[in-house]
C-alpha cells in the first residue's frame, strides 16, 4: 500500500523554523498499530492522519510513542495541506477529534486554529518540576500541562531541563513562560513522557497560556513566541471559551510511503 506524505513546518515563516509535522491523508483508517508505527518511523513530534467524513474530517495525532488528544501545530499543518495542496475550497475546514470539534480557517497567509480554551488553575509546585527545571518558578498552575511562570525571558532561555525528573510528573508535560521584550509573552515546552524532550512549537499550549496571560495583562489578543532552537511565532486571541491561534506554514517535503 502506498500513501502520500507531506512534511510541513508549522508556525514558521521560512523552512527550518517552527515545528515539523508529517501529514498523511487517508481514504479509510489504518489500524492503530500501523499508524503508531508510521509515527515512530517518521520520528517527528507529531504525525497527523485525517479521513473525510460528512461534516468535514476526522483527525488523529500520534507522537513517536502514543496517540494524543490535541495537537496544534499538526492541525495547522493538516489544514495547510488541505488548503494549499489538495485544493479544499471551503473557507473553513472542520475537524472532529478526541478534543471535540475543531475548525481552521485561512486568510492573508495566516492559518487560524479555533481550539477550546484550557484554563489552568494554581497548584503547589511539584518537587520534580523544580529539580527538572533547575530553578523554582514564581508561580505554578496546571491544566493539560504544568505551567511554570518565571520573571524574565532571559531566565527562560537559560533553563537546561533534566528530563529524568520531568518524566515523573503526572501531566502531559511542562510549559515554562514569562513576559517578553518584543512579544507579549514567550514560552518553552517539554514533554519527555511523549519522547519529545523539548517541542519546537506547541500550539495546544497556547490554549492554556492565553487564558493565564489574559488575567495578568487584562487583554485578550497576544503576540507570542516559542523560544526553542527552531523558534516559532503565534498570534493568539481569547474569545470566551475558545482560543484562536494563528501562524504560517511552509512545505518542506512531499512524497510517498509504502507499507
Image (spheres, rainbow, N blue to C red):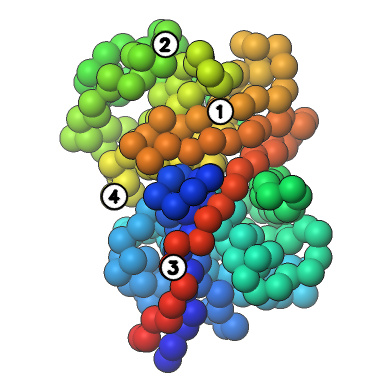
Q: CA distance from mark 2 to mark 1?
A: 14 Å
* Residue drawn at 68 percent across, 61 percent down: 95
Q: CA distance from mark 1 to mark 4?
A: 25 Å
Task: Of the two numbered discs 1 and 4 on the same chain, state the one appearing first in sequence.
Answer: 4
**Closer-to-camera residue (105/259):** 105
Q: Which residue has dot 3 on it?
A: 253
Q: Position of residue 221 (x, y in %)?
A: 70, 25
Q: Which residue has dot 1 on it?
A: 224
Task: Look at the numbered discs 4 and 3 and tell me whether their residues touch, using CB distance below 8 Å.
Answer: no
Q: Which residue has dot 4 on it?
A: 195
Q: CA distance from mark 4 to mark 2?
A: 28 Å
Task: Of the two numbered discs 4 and 3 on the same chain, state the one appearing first in sequence.
Answer: 4
**Closer-to-camera residue (30/236):** 236
Task: Of the two numbered discs 3 and 1 on the same chain, state the one appearing first in sequence.
Answer: 1
Split into 4 quadrants, where in the image is the N terminus? bottom left
Split into 4 quadrants, where in the image is the C terminus? bottom left
SS label for mark 4:
loop
Task: Look at the numbered discs 3 and 2 and tell me whether their residues touch, using CB distance below 8 Å.
Answer: no
Label 4 or label 2, whichever lies nearer to me, is 2
* Residue drawn at 71 percent across, 29 percent down: 238
- The quarter of the picture where residue 34 lies is bottom left
Q: CA distance from mark 3 to mark 2?
A: 37 Å
Label 3 or label 1, whichever lies nearer to me, is 3
SS label for mark 2:
loop
Instruction: Specify whether 39 is left or right of 92.
Output: left
Q: Which residue has dot 2 on it?
A: 152
Amino acid at each position: 500500500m502506498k500513501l502520500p506524505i507531506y512534511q510541513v513546518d508549522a508556525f514558521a515563516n521560512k523552512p527550518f523554523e517552527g515545528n515539523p509535522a508529517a501529514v498523511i491523508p487517508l481514504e479509510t483508517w489504518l489500524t492503530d498499530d500501523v499508524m503508531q508505527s508510521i509515527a515512530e518511523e517518521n520520528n517527528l513530534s507529531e504525525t497527523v492522519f485525517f479521513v473525510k467524513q460528512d461534516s468535514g474530517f476526522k483527525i488523529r495525532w500520534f507522537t513517536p510513542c502514543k496517540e494524543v488528544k490535541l495537537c496544534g501545530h499538526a492541525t495547522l499543518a493538516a489544514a495547510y495541506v488541505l488548503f494549499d495542496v489538495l485544493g479544499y475550497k471551503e473557507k473553513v475546514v472542520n475537524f472532529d477529534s478526541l478534543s471535540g470539534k475543531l475548525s481552521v480557517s485561512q486568510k492573508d497567509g495566516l492559518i487560524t486554529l479555533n481550539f477550546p480554551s484550557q484554563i489552568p488553575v494554581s497548584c503547589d509546585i511539584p518537587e520534580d518540576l523544580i529539580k527538572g527545571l533547575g530553578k523554582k518558578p514564581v508561580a505554578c498552575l496546571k491544566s493539560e500541562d504544568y505551567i511554570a511562570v518565571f520573571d524574565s525571558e532571559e531566565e527562560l532561555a537559560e533553563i537546561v531541563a533534566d528530563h529524568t525528573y520531568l518524566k515523573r510528573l503526572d501531566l502531559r508535560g511542562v510549559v515554562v513562560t514569562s513576559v517578553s521584550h518584543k512579544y507579549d509573552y514567550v514560552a518553552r515546552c517539554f514533554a519527555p513522557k511523549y519522547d519529545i524532550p523539548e517541542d519546537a512549537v506547541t500550539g495546544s499550549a497556547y490554549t492554556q497560556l492565553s487564558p493565564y496571560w489574559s488575567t495578568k495583562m487584562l487583554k485578550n489578543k497576544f503576540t507570542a513566541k516559542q523560544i526553542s532552537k527552531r523558534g516559532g511565532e503565534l498570534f493568539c486571541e481569547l474569545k470566551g471559551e475558545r482560543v484562536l491561534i494563528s501562524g504560517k506554514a511552509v512545505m518542506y517535503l512531499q512524497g510517498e510511503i509504502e507499507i
